[in-house]
Amino acid sequence: MKSTIKGDLAQLKVETAALEKGYVISRPATACRYDLIVDDGQKLWRVQVKYANGKSSNTKNSVVASLNYTDRNRKEHCYTADQIDAMAIYVPQVDKVLWLSADKVCGKSKFQIKINGRKGRLSNWYENFIW
């Protein structure tokens, strides 16, 4: 599946999850660092949407979400808290949307998500972030 299709699928999954919660979603009219505005009735959230299917190099029980974006010069950058308020990550292996606040993702290039195996004390177990 092409990356543009993966991105479109992730966005549709996130929009569906938001609508099921009764939230209002809006899309920016011009290009910017976030993909959606989510209105939960108390706050407007600038949300970047990602599709997580990267394979983790150290375990078969995890997937990796790339948190970077590439500029026009093909230079990679990490998101910052002045660009987004949260990241919504669709994980197809478990068919869930995960919600991570800016403090969990900003300044980082990737996020490893545990999807199988023993839970243990792992803080990045996918169930901890289901939206």
Image (tube, rainbow, N blue to C red):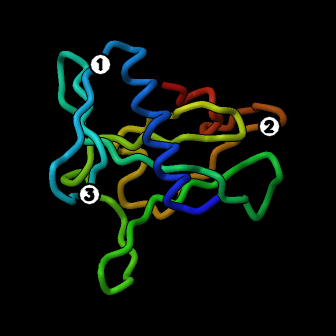
Q: Which residue is mark 2?
A: 116
Q: Nearer the viewer, residue 127 or 14?
A: 14
Query: Could you tell me residue 20's position as x and y percent?
Result: 42, 15
The dot on residue 23 is 1
Identify the secondary structure beneath mark 3: loop
Q: How would you rate the neighbour count of disc 1 (Cα within 10 Å): few for under 14, some for 14-19, many for 20 or more?
A: some
Q: Amino acid at mark 3?
A: Arg
Tag 3 or tag 2, which sits nearer the N-term? 3
Q: Which residue shows up at 44% across the image and 26% down it?
A: 16
Q: Residue 33 lies in what quarter of the image? A: bottom left
The dot on residue 33 is 3
Give the spatial CA distance, label 2 vs label 3: 31 Å
Q: Amino acid at mark 2?
A: Asn
Q: How would you rate the neighbour count of disc 3 (Cα within 10 Å): few for under 14, some for 14-19, many for 20 or more?
A: some
Position of the N terminus, as image quadrant, is bottom right
Query: Could you tell me residue 84's position as x and y percent?
Result: 26, 48
Give the spatial CA distance, label 1 vs label 3: 21 Å
Q: Residue furthest bottom?
A: 73
Q: Which residue shows up at 82% across the image and 33% down it?
A: 118
**Residue 113 as seen in the image, left or right of residue 118:** left
Give the spatial CA distance, label 2 vs label 1: 30 Å
Q: Amino acid at mark 1?
A: Tyr
Query: Could you tell me residue 82's position as x and y percent?
Result: 18, 53
